[in-house]
Image (cartoon, rainbow, N blue to C red):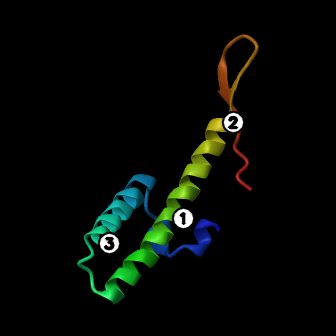
Amino acid sequence: MSEQNLPQDIAALSFEDALAELERIVRQLEEGKAKLDDAIRFYERGTLLKRHCELKLREAQAKVDRITVSADGSIGSEPARLD
């Protein structure tokens, strides 16, 4: 799944903001005080937030993987290919 398949409000979130919202949703679900319809809505949004966080982490990993060290010990980077 790509960012394009996520709702715009979620795709616009930073990793940190998405993770914080996901943590809030998990706490609400764990408390078990939400009505059934709300709990389902929270679960669905939480699933999308989790997917967004996973995509952000994969993008970051791809960038880190492209950091190179040359023979003389200098550090450089290559453009990440995220396709």
Where residue 14 appears, as percent x and y from the top left, is 44, 56
Q: Which residue is mark 3?
A: 29
The amino acid beneath tag 2 is: Arg
Q: Which residue is mark 1?
A: 51
Identified at 60% across, 74% down, the residue is: 5
Where residue 70 appears, as percent x and y from the top left, is 73, 18
Where residue 7 appears, as percent x and y from the top left, is 50, 76
Dot 2: within a 10 Å radius of its alpha carbon, few (fewer than 14), some, or many (20 or more) residues? Answer: some
Separation of marks 2 and 1 at Cα, in angstroms: 23 Å
Secondary element type, mark 3: helix
Vertical position of residue 41 compared to residue 23: above or below: below
Where residue 63 appears, as percent x and y from the top left, is 63, 41
Is 30 on the left or on the right of 64, as rendered? left
Mark 2 or 1, which is nearer the eye? Answer: 1
Separation of marks 3 and 1 at Cα, in angstroms: 18 Å
Q: Marks 3 and 2: in contact by CB < 8 Å?
A: no
Using the rendered view, name the quadrant where residue 37 is placed. bottom left
Vertical position of residue 6 compared to residue 50: above or below: below
Identified at 69% across, 44% down, the residue is: 80
Assign the C terminus to one quadrant of the image: bottom right
The amino acid beneath tag 1 is: Arg
Secondary element type, mark 1: helix
- Residue situated furthest bottom in the rendering: 37
Q: Which residue is mark 2?
A: 66
Mark 3 or 1, which is nearer the eye? Answer: 3
- The number of numbered discs placed on residues in the rendered structure image is 3
